[in-house]
Amino acid sequence: FKKEFKRILVGKNRGDKWTEGDGKTPIGIYNLKYKIDDNKLDDFYGPLAYPTNYPNLYDHYRGKNGHGIWIHGFPKDNPTRDFDTKGCIAI
């Protein structure tokens, strides 16, 4: 069984995330905090989402800030959207 991802979207601005609202996806090692199921999620995020622990302790030490970085799906009504995220990872 081979599952292929056709698209993976990241932040609209390239480079490592440093500040809230910079439109970048953080580069680092992050834990997934919990799973948000379909029935508790806006259709924009697809069938499920996993919030990350960004910024982690090392990020705080380096002076990074921000919040709300998730790994999530694509909108159910537009699975082929062709634009970047505000910092999340959309699969």
Image: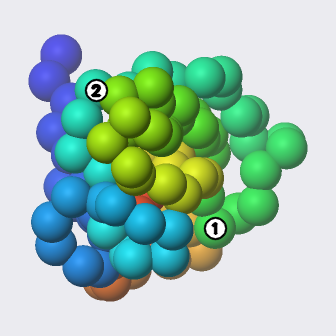
Q: Residue at x 58, y 52 (%)?
A: 67
Q: Disc 1 versus disc 2: distance between alpha carbons?
A: 25 Å
The answer to whether 90 is drawn above or below residue 34 in the figure is below
Q: Quadrant of residue 8?
A: bottom left
Estimate the x, y position of residue 7 in percent, counting from the top left.
22, 59
Q: Nearer the viewer, mark 1 or mark 2?
A: 2
Q: Is residue 34 visible?
A: yes
The disc placed on residue 44 is: 1
Q: Foreground residue, 43 or 9? A: 9
For the image shown, how many numbered marks are present on the structure? 2
Q: Residue at x 16, y 39 (%)?
A: 4
- The disc at residue 29 is 2
Amino acid at pointer 2:
Ile
Where on the picture, by quarter, is residue 58?
Answer: top left
Amino acid type at circle 1 is Phe
- Where disc 2 sits, the SS reads loop
Colour scheme employed for the rendering of this structure: rainbow
For label 2, count other residues whose C-alpha is less than 10 Å away and answer few (under 14), some (14-19) or many (20+): few
Front-lying residue, 54 or 84:
54
**Quarter of the view holding residue 2:** top left
